[in-house]
Image (cartoon, helix red, strand yellow):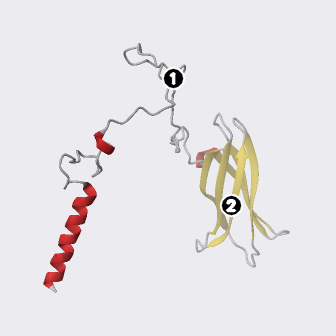
Amino acid sequence: MHRRSMRLVAVAAIGLLALTGCGKKGRHSSGSGGFVSGGAGDAPLSTPSGLPTDLPTDLPSGVPSYTPGYTPSYTPSPSYSYSTAPSYDTDARNDISASGCDYNESTSSLEYTLTVNNNETQSMRFSISIVWNDNADQGLLGSDYQSVTVAPGSSQTVKATSYRTLYKATTFTCKVQSAYKFAN
């Protein structure tokens, strides 16, 4: 078995030498990938026919310069934006005056009248939360939420209402629990 392997290696080596032409005298390859240059009798190759023979010999020297007709510019636009802090106080409790904390027996509703003043130079949206608390036990009797937009330098009156049937005489207080304003 070993002898047969040696024969195969020898046959492969001889075949390789025959293909590359390295076994012939005077025909060693010089980096041309194993192919022998030249033809029969080592005659030089002839010039292929059909090529122009009147090529100019006085070509300009140097590298031609190229100046584009425009200057390309690219200004990336950011895909994000920074919001600046508002130049006004977002707490709107000082912009609200209230009156008429009452109970309307005919509609069974707690009522509170609010006047919202916008002293800013732009239109503002006000978000206001109102609560009615029982004075006896400080329990919550009702609540309401109002959202109102007021033009700059103007005021607007809104009526907060919470429907609740009271079965006994009750004393209560009305309170603006929170009030915020935002640029509209």
| Spatial CA span between label 2 and label 1 | 59 Å
Please tell me which residue is depicted at 53% across the width and 44% down the height of the picture. 79
Q: Position of residue 169 (x, y in %)?
A: 72, 74
Query: At 22% from the left edge and 44% from the top edge, which residue is drawn?
Result: 30
Residue lying at the far front in this picture: please name it. Answer: 41
- Which is more toward the observer, 160 or 125? 125
Residue at the (39%, 19%) spot, across then down: 63
Query: Where in the figure is residue 119, as x and y percent of width and height?
Result: 64, 37
Query: Which of the 4 image quarters holds residue 100?
Result: bottom right
Q: Residues within 10 Å of mark 1 (few under 14, many from 20)?
A: few
Determine whether, in the image, residue 71 is placed left or right of residue 181. Answer: left
**Residue identifier under label 2:** 145
Report the residue marked by disc 1.
Answer: 71
Looking at the rendered image, the quarter that the N terminus falls into is: bottom left
The answer to which of marks 2 and 1 sits earlier in the sequence is 1
Look at label 2 and name its amino acid. Answer: Tyr
Of the pair 95 and 65, the residue shown nearer to us:
65
Q: Quarter of the image holding residue 38?
A: top left
Direction from residue 107 to residue 54 in the image, left or right: left
| Secondary-structure class at tag 1 | loop
Residues 154 and 121: in front is 121
**As drawn, 174 above or below 7:** above
Label 2 packing within 10 angstroms: few (<14), some (14-19), many (20+): some
